[in-house]
Image (tube, rainbow, N blue to C red):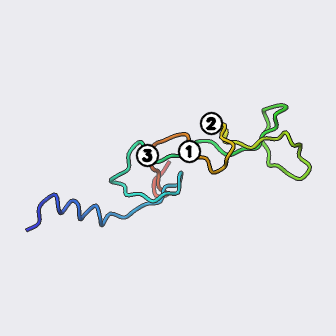
Amino acid sequence: MESAAGAKEEEKLKEKEKLCRRCKATYAPSGNTALSCRFHPSLFVCRRHDDQKRYYQLRDGDPPYAAKFYDCCGAEDPDAAGCTTDFHLSYDDHA
C-alpha cells in the first residue's frame, strides 16, 4: 500500500511542465513561487540621447549617440539577467 506522501510525490512527477512566457524557462506549476521567474518588465529599446523621448529602431545612418538598453533598469547587454522576479506566467494563463 502506497503512503500519502509517496502518492503526492508521484503526482508531482506526472505534473505537466509549462513554458514561461516571460523568461522562456520550463517549470512545474506546483513549484512556482514569487521568486521563480527572473525577467525584464520593459523592452530592450533604442533611444536618442538628445531628446530622451522618442523610441525608434536603429537604421543605417543613425547617429552614433543612439543607445540600446533595457528601459526598466538600464542594462546595456540584451542578454543581461532580468531585474525583476515574480511567478512564472505560462502561455496558458490569461493576463
Name the one closer to the observer, 83 or 56.
83
Q: Position of residue 78 (x, y in %)?
A: 66, 49
Q: Quadrant of the N terminus?
A: bottom left
Viewer-nearest of discs 3 and 1: 1
- Secondary structure at badge 3 equals loop
Is 12 positioned to the left or the right of 53 in the image? left
Nearer-N-terminus badge (3/1): 1
Amino acid type, label 1? Gly
- Secondary structure at badge 2 equals loop
Viewer-nearest of discs 3 and 2: 2
Is 95 positioned to the left or the right of 55 in the image? left
Residue hosting label 1: 82
Based on the displayed image, in which of its 4 quarters is residue 18 positioned? bottom left
Position of residue 54 relative to residue 22, above or below, is above
Residue hosting label 2: 73
- Quick one: label 1, few (<14), some, or many (20+) residues within 10 Å? some
Tell how many labels. Answer: 3
Residue at the top extreme, as displayed: 51
Question: Which residue: 54% across, 46% down?
Answer: 39
Q: Position of residue 93 (x, y in %)?
A: 45, 53
